[in-house]
Amino acid sequence: MTQISFYLTITLYGVATLAYLVCLLKTTPCRAMIARRLLIAGFLAHCLAVIHRFIAAGHLPVTNMHESLSFFALTVVGVYLCFESRYKVGILGSFVVPFALLVSLAAGMVPTAIKPLNPALKSAWIYSHTILAFGAYAFFTISCGVAVLYLMQSHFLKKKQLGQMFMKLPSLDVLDDIGYRCLAFGFPMLTVAIITGAIWASRAWGSYWSWDPKESWSLITWFIYAALLHGRLTTGWRGRRAAILTIFGFLVMLFTFIGVNLWLPGLHSYT
């Protein structure tokens, strides 16, 4: 049942991606509504797949690459749907939904077997640490999509190319507000995730911090977003530079999440 739900999720995400891309070319209220409903259907199917996996495994399904990628895609879609409902920025889905589809496809390409839980992961801290971390990752993903739209919109304004694409994009102020809210939610979540991870590491390995590759790159990611938030709060830093740093931070976050697991073996390699 888990596999059926997961492949149904990928199918619905794929169709939703096509629907959002069609809206990017020509938006109508009907097409936007269809795209959103398809994405909601995919999200519900994804929730069902994760619940089934949780029941089958007996623990939160975030302990291997398949589960982590799947849970990441789920949180990205969930957070995006909240922002789309709040700000009516369906065009953002043309960038976020394809990314969620790619992550889900990647989850389906790695081993999906449920294996015995690593002893270090048998802790209640798995819930607070991982849910907060994935929540932060989702907000940073949305902020990256917003930063791309911001750069596009600012380019159109600079070149005075006020065509159809310009009219479809939200204003720079709206995009800036969404980007700031993503940062305002994501950064505290990442901070608490790192703190709870340190406590969990102390319980599991006897040390709060061991400079494991995952820990080190998580700290690098934290500093990048801390600098971005500090710049916004103290100097009103915004615009093109902030958008570029947001995209850079997202790329570093992706490396922390995926690249470290693949290329830098350490205590967290089993994820």
Image: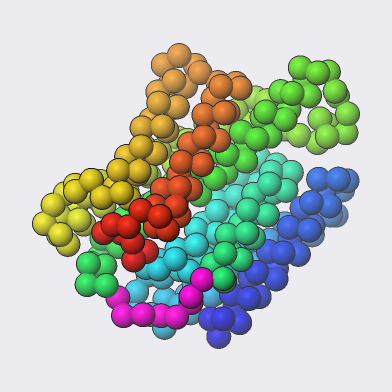
On the image, the x and y values in percent for residue 166 come to 81, 30
The residue at the point 45 percent across, 35 percent down is: 184
**Res 57 → quadrant:** bottom left
Q: Is residue 151 above or below residue 262?
A: above
Q: Is residue 244 magenta?
A: no
Q: As drawn, which residue projects farthest toward the bottom? A: 1
Q: Nearer the viewer, residue 266 or 186?
A: 266
On the image, the x and y values in percent for residue 108 come to 57, 71
Q: Nearer the viewer, residue 245 or 59?
A: 245
Q: Is residue 125 above or below residue 182?
A: below
Magenta part of the chain: 110-117
The residue at the point 41 percent across, 80 percent down is: 114
Residue 38 visible here:
no
Is residue 232 found left or right of 100 in the rendered image? left
The residue at the point 52 percent across, 29 percent down is: 245
Is residue 214 found left or right of 147 in the rendered image? left
Q: Nearer the viewer, residue 115 or 142?
A: 115
Split into 4 quadrants, where in the image is the C terminus? bottom left
Is residue 118 found left or right of 24 in the rendered image? left
What is the chief secondary structure element of the magenta stretch?
loop
On the image, the x and y values in percent for residue 154 come to 71, 23
Residue 152 visible here:
yes
The residue at the point 36 percent across, 32 percent down is: 223
Q: Is residue 115 magenta?
A: yes
Q: Nearer the viewer, residue 8 or 65?
A: 65
